[in-house]
Image (cartoon, rainbow, N blue to C red):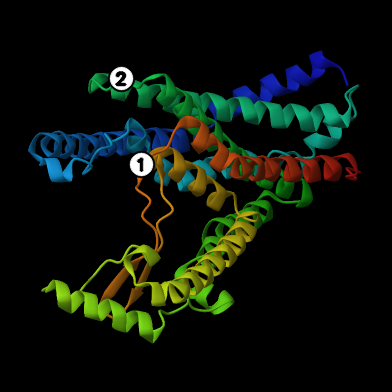
Amino acid sequence: MTGNRLFTIAQKEFFDHVRSRKFLLIFGILLVVAIVGMIGGISEYNKTLDQYNKGQSAISSEMSGYMSEKPSILGIFSSVATYLVFVGGVLGIAMGFDLVSKEKESKSLKILLSHPVYRDEVINGKALGGIIALGCALGVVLFIALATLLVYGIVPDGNELVLIAVFAGVSFLLIFSYFAIALFMSTAMDESGSALIYTIIIFIVLSVLVPTLANDTVMENLIGSQPELPQELLDQMQISTNSTGSSTGMVIVNGPASTSNSNSDAWKKFNDRMQAYSDKRQMVHDTLALFSPTMNYDAITSSITYRTSTTEMIGRSSNVVTSFSTTKTVSAGIEDILGKIIANIIALLLFPAVFFGLAYMRFMRMDVR
């Protein structure tokens, strides 16, 4: 494989993309929704910041821990992430579904391969041209997003800039994942229409159907309902409620420490069952996430944009709410966030790698006669 021929093909593909109407149309839509998402996120951030400032000046000494964490700038990008899941996926599909099938339909692929050029140069050049176009599109969106922040007088610090860069990187991986799927279908199908239809079906399955399997209703059917509080603990909490004269009929009990010694073993057994249920639910969720770049992207962007770390488990039974731990929701550090999302990033990297590898093997063995 010669570098000059590879980059010549990549350059041609890049300019074909950026000059095409479908790219400009979808890129324009992506840019508009990103700006709208940023403005909406900034408005929500300013409201939350005002509430935080008022809370800090109004809280009493007994509530000194209330709203102790200043809202993060990263929360502004949560709306942008919501739009990117759909519009970014459509952009990647639109750029990849006819890269090879279009040339098969026009018979130009046979002419191209009759020249002194290797097949791997062709498929790598087409992929590289698409990657550069996607990177430029996302780079412009990120630049506009940061410019919007500065216009509103919001300046990220060093850690926030690192997390914004991570956000941009995983957004690119999401778009590239669907581009790689579309490229594979373009090499597998003889017609662009068939490649587009099958790619859209895969997109719907991965971005809608698989995440639906992780919702509460489906999860309960897969692993069963969460454990219920034993009657003796319900009775004990009801007594506590009556003794405190609660008018709402609701009490929050912070684990075994708030119960008598006679009930400590019952609390421990119940907490163990809740932890086992939580671990089983997380295992099923993580397994489903392996088959959905959208789920991995949502997990990553949620950790980045909300920057919270909490292990509180809430159990509900009739009119009683029980808290099984006393951990406080706090702003997570950059090391904690990166450690939490590294597995999702690896899974998100595997998707484009697998589908591009399949497209590469299919193209290398394809009969163009």
Name the residue nearer the viewer: 109 or 189.
189
Say above or below: 310 vs 284.
above
Of marks 2 and 1, which one's residue comes earlier in the chain? 2
Q: Quadrant of residue 200?
A: bottom right
Q: Residues within 10 Å of mark 2 (few under 14, many from 20)?
A: some
Q: Is residue 160 visible?
A: yes
Looking at the image, which residue is at 67% across and 49% down?
192
* Front: mark 2 or 1: 1
Task: Report the disc number at residue 330.
Answer: 1
Q: Position of residue 295 (x, y in %)?
A: 54, 52
Residue at mark 2 = 155
Q: Quadrant of the N terminus?
A: top right
Looking at the image, which residue is at 64% across and 31% down?
130
Name the residue nearer the viewer: 82 or 202.
82
Q: Position of residue 261 (x, y in %)?
A: 39, 72
Instruction: Classify mark 2: helix, strand or loop.
Output: loop
Q: Position of residue 142 (x, y in %)?
A: 43, 26
Residue found farthest to the front: 261
What amino acid does circle 1 point to?
Val
